[in-house]
Structures are given as C-alpha cells and as structure tokens.
Image (cartoon, grey):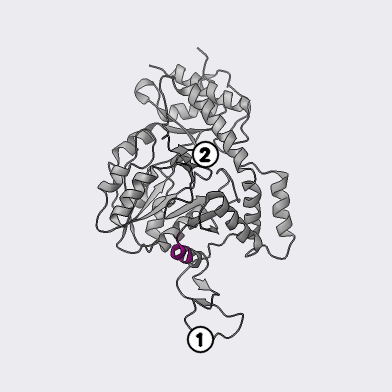
C-alpha cells in the first residue's frame, strides 16, 4: 500500500490542482478589449446580443442578463410577487443565495429534504412543506443535474405556486430533450468563473411569460421604464423622459461582461463534452471503490455537470471527512465542500432555524466532497485525481 503524502509519502502529483477553474482564451480577451475600446462599456449592444443568444440556446422566450446569479434569484422572486408573510420552499444543500433571495423580499425560506441518491430536492418533501403561505419553490439543479422538473411542476401547478429553477450549475443541461432555461416559470443562471461559461461575474433570468419578463426587466434596472405605454404621468416632456414605476435595483450587466459571455458561449458545446467525458471517467473509476459513493443521475437529465461530488461512506473508512480532505490536499489535489446546509449558519439560527430539519440532507452533507472538474483539466490531471482518491480510500479502509 502506498504511503500517504500527509504521512510523509510521495504525492501523486507535484503541482496542485483545484476543484474548479475558468478557461479564458485570447478570443475572450479580444472580445472584451473591443468593447473597452468602444464608446459603450455598459448599457450597450452586447447586452442585448447576449440575451438573444441565451434565448436561442435555451429556447426560452425571454432572457435578461444581470450582474450575478444572486441578483438573478432576487429578480425572480420580485417578479413572482414574493413579499412579507410568504414562504418559499428550497433545498438546504445549496449556496446561501437560493434561500436568501426569499429573505430579500421579506419572505421566509422553508427547507425541504433531498433525494439520498441524486442530492437534488425531493418533490415529495416539497409537497409535505406546502402551507397556505407558500408562494414559490426555488428548485436547485445541484451539480448541474436537472431536478425532477415534471414532478415539481405538477406539484406547483396543483397548488398555484411559481416554480423558480435555480440553474446556477446547469446551463447546458437538458431535461427530456428540452434545455434548462425553457421549462420552469422562471430560470436563473450564474456566470461565476467556476461555472461552465463565465462573464467574470454575471447571471441571467429566463422566462416564457411576457408579464413575468416585464417585471424582471423593471426589477433589474431601478424599476424605471422608457416605454410610453407603461408611463403613468402625462404629458411626456421629451425623449429624455423616463419614469420609475416600481422599486427596482441596479442589477445590470456591463457590455464587456456580455462580450465575454458571448465569446464563452461559442465554446459551450466543447466545454459540455469535456465535462461529460471527465464525469464518465470518474464514474467508472469510483463505482466499485469501497468507502466511495457515486452520485446517481436520473435518466431524464442530460447533464452538463458543474461539480463532481464524491460521497465518503464513513462507516467503511477509518478517517473523518476532514482527514480525507487534508490527505487529498497533501497529494496536491485540492477539493472543496458543496455545501454546508444553509440553516446551519449563525444568521439562520438567529432566525429560529435549527439542525434536524432535513435529516437526509444532513447525513449526505457529512460525507460529500467536490473533486476537480473543469474543461481545461488534462487527462493526466484526471488520472492523478482518481489515483489520489483510490490511494486515500485504500489507506483508510476498514
């Protein structure tokens, strides 16, 4: 048995690799530079071009690009009419923004449990948490795998709820042949640097509903309109005139961010194919490794995976997750944990949330760990990651 690097052995590789990394090309840089050299670096034509591109790619009727994925979720909740006294159901295994977006509107997040195999929100748990205060469901495509959209949509339709699909992880994923972005009432994307495509930061809100689209547009741009048909006061003083007709925010994307997104989108097929190839190698490598559980995938989801999660079966290992994590780092494969259950955080405790709300999520959280997955990852780096996981699992096997 190989001696672990953390115990003085030779690491599997000499240079450290990380769980995620952007891939910026010369074409990306040129696209951004062209905008920076031009007259409009914000509120320019690249923003509209990016929106039309997202509509074409996803099949959604409307897309609005915004400053980041959190802003996208906030706009989605505002468009859905969520306010004080309302409840919004979401998953605890997500980034905090999936729940915080309800708090921004004065509503209360309610946490439903997850499926123990896919780690996505469980439709049955959603239904069990619906009350007369429930207004919407924020269903998160965790790791990029689509949630059970048909089942969740049926629950939402039956109870008169808005379905917001938090697709921060899942641009490029399709569900039953339809692209994510065109299915839920509202879908949100994130273009953070570790996502499949990046705008530096940035996000988008997509919908097929004309009225929701109008509300999203107002929410992301100060609640201001230049459309005379929407204005409430008359006469209009001149072409400079505009009106604030509702409260809104400055969540606009810049033109140079939009240019980067457009350039990145030209390679999304390549990025998706590489991610799928790496996931296939990992799945094959880990399927029979004692102490390692592979995330399950529903057949309806053709997944563009953002994260690759291994789950440690701690009953079959002599180490803790922290010890496994540190051993991976010593082998020069730096992992990450996605995510701490949202209601574990002190802020949520002060709001009255406590541990024990979602037993499956809490059990899954104990063992999950994200290993490197990004398109620029070489075959050698993939093999080094596999070797590190197997080496450590063998060393700590019961």
Is residue 249 something one can see in this rendering?
Answer: yes
Q: Is residue 353 left or right of residue 272?
A: left
* Residue 210 locus on image (x, y percent): 46, 64
Is residue 211 magenta-colored? yes
In primary-sequence order, the first of circles 1 and 2 is 1
Horizontal and vertical percent for residue 318? 38, 21
What residue is drawn where x is 60% and y is 27%?
381
Range of residues picked out in magenta: 209-215
Q: Magenta span: helix, strand or loop, mainly?
A: helix
Instruction: Determine crowd level at label 2: few under 14, some 14-19, many 20+ residues with C-alpha closer than 10 A.
Output: many
- In space, the residues marked 1 and 2 are separated at their CA atoms by 50 Å
As helix, strand or loop, the secondary structure at mark 2 comes to loop
Q: Which mark is residue 304?
A: 2
The disc at residue 300 is none
Q: Residue furthest front?
A: 177
Query: Which residue is identified by label 1?
Result: 234
Of the pair 338 and 77, the residue shown nearer to us = 77
Quarter of the C terminus within the rendering: top left
What SS does tag 1 mark?
Answer: loop
Q: Position of residue 326 (x, y in %)?
A: 49, 29
Task: Please determine whether, in this image, residue 359 is positioned above or below residue 388.
Answer: below
Q: Are marks 1 and 2 in contact (CB under 8 Å)?
A: no
- 170 sits to left or right of 48: left
Q: Is residue 73 above or below residue 316?
A: below
Instruction: Name the residue at 54% across, 21% down.
Output: 387
């Amino acid at each position: 048995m190989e001696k672990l690097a953390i115990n003085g052995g030779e690491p599997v590789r000499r240079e450290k690799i990380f769980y995620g990394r952007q891939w910026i090309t010369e074409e990306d840089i040129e696209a951004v530079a062209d905008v920076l050299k031009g007259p409009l670096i914000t509120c320019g034509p690249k923003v509209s071009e990016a929106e039309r591109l997202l509509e074409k790619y996803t099949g959604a009727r409307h897309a609005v690009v915004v400053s980041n994925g959190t802003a996208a979720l906030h706009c989605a909740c505002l468009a859905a009419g969520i306010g004080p006294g309302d409840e919004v159901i979401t998953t605890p295994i997500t980034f905090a923004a999936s729940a915080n977006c309800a708090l921004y509107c004065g509503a209360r997040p309610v946490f439903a449990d997850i499926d123990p195999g896919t780690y996505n929100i469980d439709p049955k748990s959603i239904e069990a948490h619906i009350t007369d205060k429930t207004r919407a469901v924020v269903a998160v495509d965790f790791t990029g795998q689509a949630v059970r959209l048909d089942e969740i949509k049926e629950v939402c339709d039956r109870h008169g709820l808005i379905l917001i699909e938090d697709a921060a992880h899942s641009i490029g994923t399709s569900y039953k042949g339809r692209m994510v972005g065109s299915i839920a009432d509202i879908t949100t994307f994130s273009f953070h640097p570790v996502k499949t495509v990046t705008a530096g930061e940035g996000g988008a809100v997509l919908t097929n509903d004309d009225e929701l689209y109008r509300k999203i547009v107002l929410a992301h741009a100060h609640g201001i309109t230049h459309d005379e048909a929407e204005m409430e006061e008359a006469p209009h003083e001149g072409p400079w005139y505009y009106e604030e007709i509702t409260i809104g925010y400055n969540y606009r994307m810049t033109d140079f961010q939009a240019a980067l997104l457009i350039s990145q989108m030209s390679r999304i097929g390549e990025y998706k194919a590489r991610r799928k190839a790496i996931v296939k190698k990992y799945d094959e490598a880990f399927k029979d490794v004692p102490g390692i559980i592979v995330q399950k995938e529903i057949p309806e989801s053709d997944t563009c995976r953002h994260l690759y999660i291994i789950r440690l079966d701690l009953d079959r290992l002599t180490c803790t997750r922290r010890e496994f994590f540190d051993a991976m780092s010593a082998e020069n494969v730096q992992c990450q944990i996605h995510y701490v259950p949202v209601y574990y955080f002190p802020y949520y405790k002060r709001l009255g949330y406590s541990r024990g709300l979602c037993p499956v999520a809490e059990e899954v959280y104990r063992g999950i760990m994200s290993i490197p997955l990004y398109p620029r990852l070489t075959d050698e780096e993939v093999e080094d990651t596999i070797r590190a996981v197997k080496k450590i699992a063998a060393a700590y096997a019961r």
